[in-house]
Image: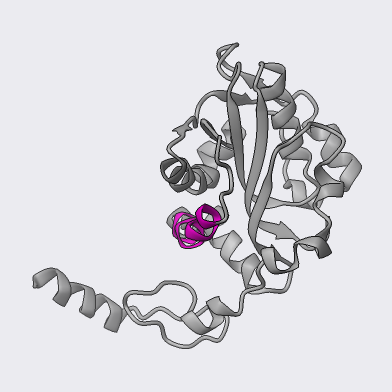
Amino acid sequence: MMGGLFSGLVDTLFPSYCICCQSRLPAERRFICSTCFDELPRYEENATYYDVETRLEGYVPYSEYHADLVFTHTNAVRDLIHLIKYRQSPELGRSLVEYFLPGHLEQGHYPDVSIVVPVPLAPKRLRHRGYNQSDFLAAPLAKALGAELMTDAVARRDREPSGTQTARSRRQRWEHMEGIFSVKAPGTFTGRRVLLVDDLLTSGATLIRLAQTIMSDGAESVSYYTLAVDEKS
């Protein structure tokens, strides 16, 4: 009872508002109201429009790619991704994946995956941020698929300058990502079917370079999941 009273008091003193319409949110919701959430652009409804295959095909053979939302620099998905990555709200990412998971399971996505690997952050960025947002996205996927979650199997070199992948040209992304990943214990992925998880697909350079590393370690196959797809790569 005291917990409920305290929660109600906090909600009264420090109310939350929807990032889209600015309406006050009930205590059980955070960041976005149900109406605005339902209006977020869904990737699966327009999958062919974004032509993800041209970003991913021809580099590493992959089994599946799926996403749930469409990111632009003006829509609410951008705000949600920024909350997850930069504003200490990684649990929001977990909640979003958990919301969309039943749809993936119903459609039989990733049936044979045995390992789930979140895309690792560079050590400097991880120290600065304090968490890897992809870990939070990957955890519910691994649990639902009955797969092993490996958050520390792949190392990422600490050589990133200031700025992010989204600020680079397509060619710069590819050059920057070359040789950046390595498997810590060779043979970890031999004969395994691996799902790679990230928050956002832009050019595909990060996922493909990671997939190349894992396939070189003997993985049988790789698949991809990102929470969102950038409308423009």
Residue at the image point whose x is 51% and y is 48% from the top = 137
User: Could you tell me residue 69's position as x and y percent?
Assistant: 64, 64
User: Could you tell me residue 29's position as x and y percent?
Assistant: 38, 74
User: Could you tell me residue 187's position as x and y percent?
Assistant: 59, 12
Q: Main secondary structure of the magenta part?
A: helix
Residue 21 visible somewhere in the drawing? yes
Asked whether, in this view, residue 189 is left or right of residue 41, the answer is left
- Residue 97 falls inside the magenta stretch: yes
Camera-side residue: 167 or 94? 94
Q: Which residues are magenta?
A: 94-106
Give above or below for 230 relative to 34.
above
Quadrant where the N terminus is found in the figure: bottom left
Residue at the image point whose x is 49% and y is 76% from the top = 32
Furthest residue to the top?
Answer: 186
Asked whether, in this view, residue 134 is left or right of residue 201, the answer is left
Camera-side residue: 120 or 149? 149
- Residue 210 falls inside the magenta stretch: no
Quadrant where the C terminus is found in the figure: bottom right
User: Could you tell me residue 232's position as x and y percent?
Assistant: 83, 60
